[in-house]
Amino acid sequence: MVKYVIYGKIIIDDIRTSDGRLVQDVLGGGGPQGAFGARLWSDSVGLLSRSGMDISAAHTETIERLGIDVSGWVKYPDILTPHTGMAYDEKGERSGFLVAPDRAVGSENWVRLLSQQLTLPPAYQNPAVIHLICERPTDPMIKTALDLKMHGTIFSLEPVMDYRRWGNRDEFLDLFKQVDVITPDWHSASGLAGSDDLGRVLKFWSNLGPTLVTIRHGQFGSYSWDQQHDQFWHVPVLPVMVVDPTGAGNCFGGGLCVGWHVTGDACMAGCYGTVSASFLVRQFGLPKMSAELQLEAQALLQQALAATKIL
């Protein structure tokens, strides 16, 4: 049985960096990125995702060489794999950008792909953790995760929120009360809390119901809290050369949920996520999994832990 199930999209990205470079056809999406973040710490990771049959052999090989279970990855012959474009400003913040028309995938294709019902393969039906990277509180996989939670599975959620319009605010708030682990980004966390004051934001999220809350804040690191210890921690980012920040948050969440399951400690879980994200930002796309990479991760875990501070 697979211990850690990661649910998220597969997307092919075109990326314009802060210095103006354009890098095309990069394998991305929360599914592969989150799976890498978890796989760094465990050899029992499964990917639950969708794509078209048009996905290239090279991208398929990249996912498979992670050494994860892909029986939950469904490919459709009549639906295209999503293709997006993003740009970053000098601060590393996203600043728009759409792919060229000949590379774009229409919104109706996205709707068709995400409306396809996924079922858990046999190996995924009793995981220790199910981690969802999800933008719709009505996603059918939410119910699946809640059903698993009733039988002892940890339900971990990375909510992808519309923090500019808050079209799904109330639905997400209801959902947050039911999950075990939640890891929003800073824009969503501060926007929902109605404040840019760190203390107020952390207090707001610690009262929503999850056992573990970790707020991701890009170059400023992350902030973690769990009910048992009722202590807030700051985990800074590791000092690495950032080549591409795309997917760092997704990768963080994959590492976080493994760290939480293994240690039951908010500070340590945040360190696991931080180390996972540090590998992803050093290149475009997914790193190649190896024993050497995992040994480096263990060393970086101690470095991350030494840098943490109580808030």
Image (cartoon, rainbow, N blue to C red):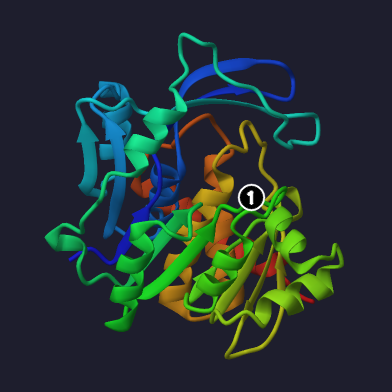
Q: Kindly identify which residue carries mark 1.
A: 162
Residue located 63% across and 31% down the image: 243
Residue located 51% across and 17% down the image: 24
Extreme residue toward the left, this view: 122
Q: Position of residue 13 (x, y in %)?
A: 50, 26
User: Can residue 298 be seen?
Assistant: no
Q: Quadrant of residue 308?
A: bottom right
Q: Quadrant of the N terminus?
A: bottom left
Q: Position of residue 235 (x, y in %)?
A: 69, 64
User: Can residue 245 be seen?
Assistant: yes
Q: Is residue 108 above or below residue 48?
A: above
- Quick check: 161 left or right of 194? left
Q: Position of residue 140 (x, y in %)?
A: 34, 59
- Element type at marker 1? loop
User: In this figure, what is the number of numbered marks?
Assistant: 1
Q: Nearer the viewer, residue 256 or 100?
A: 100
Near mark 1 (Cα within 10 A), the count class, few <14, some 14-19 or many ≥20, is some
Q: Nearer the viewer, residue 49 or 232?
A: 49
Q: Nearer the viewer, residue 44 or 225?
A: 225
Q: Quadrant of residue 116?
A: top left
Q: Quadrant of the C terminus?
A: bottom right
Amino acid type, callout 1 = Asp
Q: Position of residue 99 (x, y in %)?
A: 55, 17
Residue located 51% across and 71% down the image: 175
Q: Quadrant of residue 46?
A: bottom left
Residue located 16% across and 61% down the image: 123
Q: Nearer the viewer, residue 29 or 40?
A: 29
